[in-house]
Image (cartoon, rainbow, N blue to C red):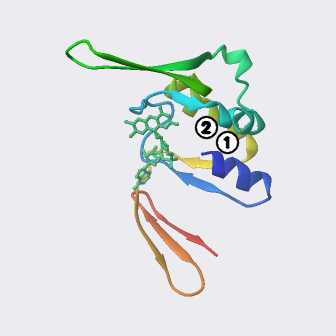
């Protein structure tokens, strides 16, 4: 989704195929390293407005009660994957990305001059 936004901003015509429909849930730890903060902001995700929680400490617990703890010098932030994906999808659409939802890609083939993308709805051609 991030790449689709970047490519569209560079002037490419982009279609993103998604077999599901936004917004939808994905299994995720919902921890993002702080290194990604500026990148997500540049894409248009307003993280301060989303009031994300900052994470600076890791704890791993075992069923017997033992606990490992470690400071995270760099740290990160916690964010709902559902909310982040939904926000990125909205930014992509408003940037000009065409998002084809409920569309499963079944095959991609190259014939020397371009690609044919066979989906559950129809075939697409990219040069
Ligand atoms: C259990 C788990 C926990 C994770 N926790 C974290 C975390 O806490 N922090 C972190 O930074 N990263 C985490 N990750 C990694 C992170 O989820 C991935 O790095 C990231 O999602 C990769 O993005 P992507 O766009 O390449 O793929 P995805 O986010 O997987 O997106 C691919 C999309 O393509 C769609 N799709 C698949 N096949 C087709 C098809 N044939 N046709 C059409 N659409 C299709 C899928 O529905 C999906 O929406 C976790 C991963 C897992 C599995």
| Whole-percent x, y for residue 64 in the image | 20, 15
Nearer to the camera, 48 or 72: 72
What residue is shown at x 60% (from left), y 85% (from top)? Answer: 113
- Label 1–label 2 contact, CB within 8 A: yes
Q: Specify the quadrant of the image occupied by residue 51.
A: top right
Q: Specify the quadrant of the image occupied by residue 83.
A: top right
| Quarter placement of the C terminus | bottom right
Mark 2 near ligand 1 (CB under 8 Å)? no
Numbered badge on residue 107: none
Taking 124 as reference, is 66 above or below it? above
Taking 19 as reference, is 61 above or below it? above
Residue 77 visible from this viewpoint: yes
Q: How many labels does the image show?
A: 2
Residue 97 visible from this viewpoint: no
| Whole-percent x, y for residue 49 in the image | 72, 16
Mark 1 near ligand 1 (CB under 8 Å)? no
Q: Which residue is labeled 2 in the image?
A: 89
Q: Which residue is labeled 1 in the image?
A: 92
Q: How crowded is mark 2: few (under 14 residues within 10 Å), some or many (20 or more)?
A: many
Would residue 42 be found to the left or right of residue 16 on screen? Answer: right
Taking 26 as reference, is 59 above or below it? above
Q: Is mark 2 on a helix, strand or loop?
A: helix
| Whole-percent x, y for residue 124 in the image | 53, 67
Q: What element carries label 1?
A: helix
Q: Cα distance, mark 1 to mark 2?
A: 5 Å
| Quarter placement of the N terminus | top right
- Split into quadrants, the picture shows ligand 1 in the one at top left
Q: Residues within 10 Å of mark 1 (few under 14, many from 20)?
A: many
Q: Residue furthest bottom?
A: 112
| Whole-percent x, y for residue 87 in the image | 63, 30
């Amino acid at each position: 989704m991030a790449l689709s936004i970047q490519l569209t901003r560079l002037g490419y015509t982009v279609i993103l195929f998604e077999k599901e429909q936004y917004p939808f849930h994905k299994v995720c730890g919902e921890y993002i390293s702080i290194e990604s903060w500026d990148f997500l902001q540049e894409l248009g995700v307003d993280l301060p407005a989303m009031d994300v929680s900052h994470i600076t400490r890791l704890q791993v617990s075992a069923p017997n009660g033992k606990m490992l703890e470690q400071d995270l010098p760099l740290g990160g932030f916690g964010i709902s994957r559902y909310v982040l994906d939904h926000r990125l999808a909205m930014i992509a659409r408003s940037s000009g990305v065409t998002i084809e939802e409920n569309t499963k890609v079944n095959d991609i083939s190259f014939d020397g001059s371009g690609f044919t993308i066979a989906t559950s709805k129809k075939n697409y051609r990219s040069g």
